[in-house]
């Protein structure tokens, strides 16, 4: 299964398995890479008690370097990533919008009158509240995980063109067909086009709705102006007659008020003149009474008795005069009040008649205001209904725009001139214990500088090594680990993987074992492993050397 596929290109691009940090000065050679992977595999192999190498409860069947096929496909000025093994898929969802053509048709057919157009908006108030369902579009092979794409953006800058034919590499063959990739891209383009068309169609419908509503409102406002003009003409037509009638009413009541006022004023004048005479008489009597008193008190007067009698007569008259004055004043006030009351009464009657004459004006104004109020309410209703429908449409457009932006999140920036096959390196190990077996994937690593190692002086063995080899990407590790799941579920795939893995195992090929030994020596020189560990792994390599000289592995 690790053999080259005839449908794959002869050359492609290869990503590095290990990448050194900028602070690391020494190169991390391929031999060191293989030695480190062997060290990690041995540290993970379950062991029992033994005096020298520990009794192996688990057997390390093979460790091989493999390459996972990744396709970079040009797409709309960007690049899509496809899983060459077709283990990955991505599901997109398409929200089905309501039938916009039916909505537009209803608007056009019912815009002849304001009443029918308003009724149409009422019926369709919730037309765009919800989508008419959801479609699932599954695109086989498409890698759309955002974390994985972000990590590939950085990692792909490290890729180099393969110097040899891909068939010389232990590579997992490409199982995704060209037609599947084309279909996937076609699905994406079609979905994007449908989404963009939905946005454009809804926006056009919003424009149509706005245009018709604005036109209807203009029509209603023209009707309001027409109503004002019609009533103004009617009012102007009857205005002279009403004014003449009001003038007659006012003239009539002015004359009545004048006659009444004349009668009352004559009586008031008489009472006023009478009051003056009475006050005059009162003053005269008071003067005479005072003179009588003076004469009575005079020593020379010989007519005191006469003056005394006269004083008594005067004093008898004074109360009567005062009473007459008071009665006359009261009567005068009464007449004045009656005059005021009569004038007020006549004015009220005049106002009533004027109001009756003006009633035709008031009725016309009330009818005008009522019609205008109804028209204004129609405008408010149209504006509110249009706003409600438009807001629902805007929500759909917003949702669609978000969906449209999602297409950009599943792509890499930068367009490829042509499709490219990229080989993602990893190491695969198989362990066995009786009937039990398990596979372990070792994903690409970043090699740290020695500074971290010196800070971890207490770290020993695998912990010491792992502190130097940092997983390049959790997303890529998760992506590669899915291979184990497919191997476990597919016996045929497991058989093929195992056969090819043994054939390409770094433990069973002499050239690679020599490289591992050199790598272990380099690791020991850089203090990655101890001398005792170097000795142990030298013995392990010796065991595998003997195993390689024996018959091939039986599955």
Image: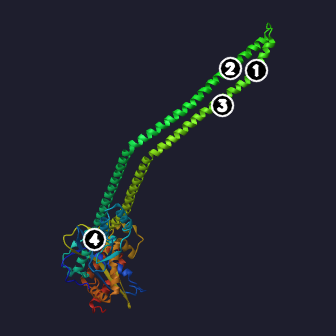
Secondary structure of the residue carrying tag 2 is helix
- Distance CA(mark 1)–CA(mark 4): 122 Å
The front one of 138 and 46 is 138
Q: Which residue reaches farthest top?
A: 300
Q: Pointer 1: what residue?
A: 315
Q: Residues within 10 Å of mark 1 (few under 14, many from 20)?
A: some
Q: Pointer 3: what residue?
A: 330
The front one of 359 and 420 is 359
The disc, 3 or 2, on the residue closer to the chain's N-terminal end is 2
- Distance CA(mark 1)–CA(mark 3): 23 Å
| Camera sees residue 20 | no
Q: Residues within 10 Å of mark 3 (few under 14, many from 20)?
A: few
Find residue 313 and report its image quarter.
top right
User: x%, y% of residue 72?
Assistant: 24, 73
Q: Indicate which label's residue lies in the foreground, 4 or 3.
A: 3
Residue 194 is labelled as 4
In this picture, is 57 found above or below 125? below
Which quarter of the figure is the N terminus placed in? bottom left
Q: Evaluate if marks 1 and 4 touch, with contact meaning CB atoms under 8 Å apart.
A: no
Q: In the image, is 73 to the left or to the right of 234?
A: left
The front one of 450 and 265 is 265
Q: In the image, is 449 to the left or to the right of 247?
A: left
Q: In the image, is 463 to the left or to the right of 413?
A: right
In this picture, is 286 found above or below 447? above
The disc, 1 or 3, on the residue closer to the chain's N-terminal end is 1
Secondary structure of the residue carrying tag 4 is helix
User: x%, y% of residue 426?
Assistant: 30, 78
Q: Residues within 10 Å of mark 2 (few under 14, many from 20)?
A: some
Q: Evaluate if marks 2 and 4 touch, with contact meaning CB atoms under 8 Å apart.
A: no
The disc, 1 or 4, on the residue closer to the chain's N-terminal end is 4
Secondary structure of the residue carrying tag 3 is helix
């Amino acid at each position: 299964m690790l053999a080259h596929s005839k449908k794959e290109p002869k050359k492609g691009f290869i990503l590095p398995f290990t990448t050194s940090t900028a602070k690391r000065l020494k190169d991390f050679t391929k031999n060191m890479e293989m030695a480190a992977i062997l060290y990690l595999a041995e540290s993970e192999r379950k062991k029992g008690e033994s005096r020298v190498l520990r009794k192996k409860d688990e057997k390390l069947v093979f460790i091989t370097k493999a390459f996972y096929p990744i396709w970079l496909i040009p797409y709309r000025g960007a690049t899509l990533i496809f899983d060459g093994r077709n283990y990955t898929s991505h599901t997109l969802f398409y929200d089905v919008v309501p039938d916009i053509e039916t909505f537009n048709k209803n608007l056009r057919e019912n815009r002849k009158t304001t009443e029918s157009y308003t009724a149409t908006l009422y019926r369709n108030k919730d037309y765009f509240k919800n989508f008419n369902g959801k479609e699932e579009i599954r695109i086989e092979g498409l890698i759309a995980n955002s974390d994985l794409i972000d990590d590939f953006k950085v990692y792909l800058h490290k890729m180099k063109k393969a110097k040899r034919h891909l068939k010389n590499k232990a590579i997992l063959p490409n199982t995704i067909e060209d037609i599947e990739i084309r279909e996937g891209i076609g699905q994406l383009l079609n979905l994007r086009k449908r989404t963009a068309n939905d946005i454009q169609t809804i926006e056009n419908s919003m424009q149509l709705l706005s245009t018709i509503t604005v036109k209807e409102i203009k029509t209603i406002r023209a009707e309001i102006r027409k109503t004002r003009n019609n009533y103004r003409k009617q009012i102007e037509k009857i205005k002279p007659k009403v004014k003449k009638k009001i003038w007659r009413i006012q003239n009539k009541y002015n004359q009545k008020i004048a006659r009444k006022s004349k009668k009352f004023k004559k009586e008031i004048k008489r009472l006023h003149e009478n009051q003056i005479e009475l006050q005059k008489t009162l003053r005269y009597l008071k003067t005479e009474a005072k003179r009588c008193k003076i004469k009575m008190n005079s020593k020379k007067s010989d007519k005191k008795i006469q003056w005394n009698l006269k004083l008594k007569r005067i004093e008898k008259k004074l109360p009567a005069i005062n009473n007459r004055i008071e009665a006359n004043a009261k009567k005068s006030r009464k007449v004045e009040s009656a005059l005021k009351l009569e004038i007020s009464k006549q004015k009220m009657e005049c106002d009533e008649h004027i109001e009756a004459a003006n009633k035709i004006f008031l009725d016309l104004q009330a009818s005008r205001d009522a019609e205008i109020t109804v028209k204004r309410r129609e405008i408010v209703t149209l504006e509110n209904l249009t706003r409600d429908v438009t807001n629902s449409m805007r929500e759909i457009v917003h949702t669609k725009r978000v969906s449209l932006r999602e297409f950009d999140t599943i792509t890499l920036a930068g367009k490829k001139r042509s499709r490219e096959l990229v080989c993602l390196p990893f190491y695969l190990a198989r362990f066995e214990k009786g009937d039990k077996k398990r596979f372990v994937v070792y994903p690409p690593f970043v090699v740290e500088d020695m500074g971290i190692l010196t800070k971890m002086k207490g770290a020993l063995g695998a912990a010491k090594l792992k502190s130097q080899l940092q997983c390049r990407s959790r997303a890529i590790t998760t992506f590669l680990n899915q291979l184990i799941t497919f191997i476990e579920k597919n016996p045929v795939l497991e058989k093929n993987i195992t056969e090819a893995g043994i054939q390409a195992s770094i433990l069973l090929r002499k050239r690679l074992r020599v490289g591992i030994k050199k790598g272990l020596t380099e690791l020991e020189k850089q203090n990655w492993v101890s001398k005792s560990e170097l000795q142990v792994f030298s013995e392990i390599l010796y065991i595998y050397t003997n195993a390689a000289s024996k018959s091939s592995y039986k599955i």
